[in-house]
Amino acid sequence: MNMTIVNHHLSVGHIAIGGVASASLVLIGDSETIQLASAFDTPPESLIIGPFPEKQNNKKNEEKR
Amino acid sequence: MSRLSVVHFLRANAVVFSSVVQIGDSQEIRLSARALAVQRQLEYVDSREFPLTFPIFTKPIPLPPADDESVYHYTLHDCPLIAVHSVRVIGISSTSVVHIGSTKTVEANSRVKHIRQLERREQHASSRRSD
């Protein structure tokens, strides 16, 4: 396949970005290849409902003292 | 030939956790971020508690399949300029890049695992009453 790209005048006023995070990219320029991948895991088993072991709480209190 | 990037004003408030603001051309960018986020109802911290052996940190991330047919592309820069008056970024975090200028290859991957721990229901009810 043949492809021809003609870049004419490009002028941008203002760019406002809240956040760029987790191996992301903001590029003002040219690039040949960009390959970004992201994996995010919050499965049901990663929601632990109690108990906070007594031992842990004691340890925490000891540390506080 | 790549174009010239002209940015008159750039303001970044926070650049944290191995992030970069790159002004000028670069050749190769490789980014890798791993994060384990633990949120608890009760305050408890033990950095040795979870070894980083969750499958999300080791599983290969599948890449989009490349088309067998090769693409021959010709780019003509009629105007070799990318002009931006102003850029305002509040936060750049976790191995990210804000790049003014051209580059050749960018490869990035991020793996984030979230764990949440809540109190047991009866404990939860009693703590609520005390509030």
Image (tube, helix red, strand yellow):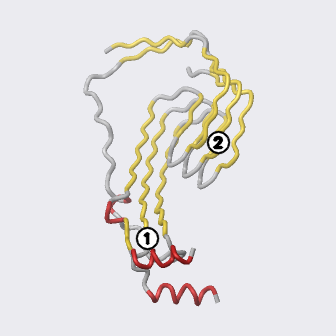
Q: Name the kind of residue labelled 2 in the image.
A: Val
How far from the left and from the top, in percent, is residue B32?
48, 51
Which residue of the protein is positioned furthest toward the left in this rendering?
B68
> What residue lies at 43% left-to-right and 70% top-to-bottom?
B117
Give residue A3's mark: none
Establish if B4 lies above or below A44: above
Quarter of the image with the C terminus of chain A is: bottom right
Quarter of the image for residue B51 reads: bottom left
Establish if A25 lies above or below A41: above
Quarter of the image for residue A48 reads: bottom left
Q: Which badge, 2 or 1, is on the more N-terminal residue? A: 2
Q: Name the kind of residue labelled 1 in the image.
A: Leu
Q: Is residue B89 left or right of residue B54?
A: right
Residue picked out by circle 1: B118
Identify the chain of the residue marked 1, using the numbered disc in the image.
B
- Mark 2 and mark 1, same subunit? yes
Front one among A6 and A62: A62
Which residue of the protein is positioned furthest toward the front in this rendering?
B129
- Disc 2 secondary structure class: strand
For label 2, the crowd category at 10 Å Cα-Cα, with few meaning under 14, some 14 to 19 and many 20 or more, is some
Cα–Cα gap, marks 2 and 1 = 38 Å
Residue picked out by circle 2: B21
